[in-house]
Amino acid sequence: MLSDSLPVVGTEAQFAAVRRDEGRLRPGVLALCRRLGRRDVEVTRFPDGSLPVYAVGDRYVLKLYPPIDQERWKTEDRVLRTIDGRLPVPTPRVEESGEFGDWRYVLMTRLRGEPLTEVWPRTSERDRDRLAEQLGTALAALHEIRVPALGPPDWRRFLADQRDDCVERQRARGLDPRWVAQIPGFLDSVALPPSSPVLLHTEVMREHLLVVPGPDGGWSLSGLYDFEPAMMGDREYEFVSVGLFVSRGDARFLRRLLTAYGYGDRLDAALQRRLLAYTLLHRYSDLSWYLEELPDPPVPTLDALAARWWSLDTS
C-alpha cells in the first residue's frame, strides 16, 4: 500500500530518485492538500523545476522541500513574506507554510500569465522593450528590500571561497582547457569593488517570468517567482542570470533593462567584464554549458565572451 506521507529521503541521490517517481510522491501530496483544506480540487504537478511543485486548482501552488533542502524552504518562505506587495511585478503570496513529516512546504498563490520561455518567439521589438524596462524597474525595487538573517553572512568571504575553487569547479564540469587556462588571469584583471549587499533573486531567467497580453495587444510582465535560491550580495551578481537566460546576447534588451534599473552612463566594457567575473564566481556556474547555449564570441577569449553575452552595442 502506498503511504499517505511523503517519502523519507536523506541524501541527494535518494531525493533525485523520489523526484522522478511521481507514484511515491502523489499520495503524500494529496494527503497534505487534504490537511490544508484543498480536498476537492485538481492537483497537477508542474513538469519542470529542481523541487516538486504542484498546481492546486487554479488558485494555488504547492512547493515541497525535502529534509536536505530545509534552508531553501526557510529562504523562500522568508523572502516571499518580506517582498509581498512591494514590487511593481506580482510575486507569489504565502498562504500557508510548515512541516509535513520530514518535509517542508509552502502553499502560495498562483500567478497568472504564460512563461516567457514560451512567449518570447512571439514577442515584438516593442514588447521586448517594455519587458526589459519592467524587469529592470522590478529588480531595482527588489534590491532596495532587506531580508533579515539571509546569507551569506560575509559576501567578500563568499567571493574569495568561490574564487579559490573556480578553476577546479569549471574543469570538473567539462570546460575546455583552453578556456580554463584563461580564468586566473581574467579574474586577476577584474576589480570587484566592495559594496553593501542587496537582496538578490540570483536566478532571473525566462523560465521564472510570466507575461500576459497588454492593453495594446502586446505582452507585459505579470509575475516573478522561484525565490528559494535568493541571497544577499552585490547587485551586479543578479545580472549574471539576466544576461545568460533572459537577454542572451540581445544588446537592445539588456541596455534598456540596465537603464531602467538606473545604470545611466555606467554601461561600458568594465561592467561587461565584471558580469563575466561574477558568472565565473557564481555558485551554480557552468561555463561549458553556457558556451553550448549562447552565441559564440568572435574570438575564443573571456574578454570577447563578456562583450558578446552582455552586449550593449545597439548600433
Image (cartoon, rainbow, N blue to C red):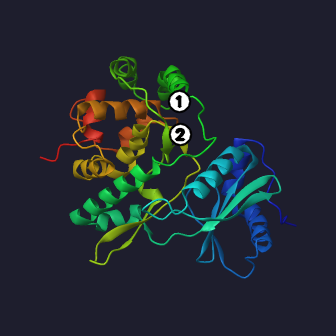
Q: To which residue does mark 1 refer?
A: 155
Give the camera-side residue of 257 and 43. 257
Label 1: state its secondary structure. helix
Q: Which amino acid lies under the numbered mark 1 shown in the image of this protein?
A: Trp
**How many residues crowd around disc 1 within 10 Å: few (fewer than 14), some, or many (20 or more)?**
some
- Mark 1 vs 2: CB contact within 8 A: yes
Residue at x 46%, y 47% (from the top left corner): 144
Residue ID for mark 2 = 232
Say what amino acid the circle numbered 2 marks.
Answer: Met
Image height of 29 relative to 140, above or below: below
Q: CA distance from mark 1 to mark 2?
A: 8 Å
Identity of the residue furthest to the left in this view: 315
Name the residue at 48% across, 48% down.
203
Image height of 6 relative to 270, above or below: below
Image-based side of 31 in relation to 238, left or right: right
Q: For mark 2, does the 10 Å Cα neighbourhood hold few (<14), some (14 to 19), or many (20 or more) residues? A: many
Residue 211 visible in this rendered orientation of the protein: yes
Label drawn at residue 205: none
Q: What percent of the width, then of the height, locates residue 8? A: 81, 51
Location of residue 179 with respect to 1 vertically, above or below: above
Q: Residue 1: image x %, image y %?
A: 88, 67
| Between discs 1 and 2, the one toward the N terminus | 1
Q: Is residue 156 above or below residue 246?
A: above
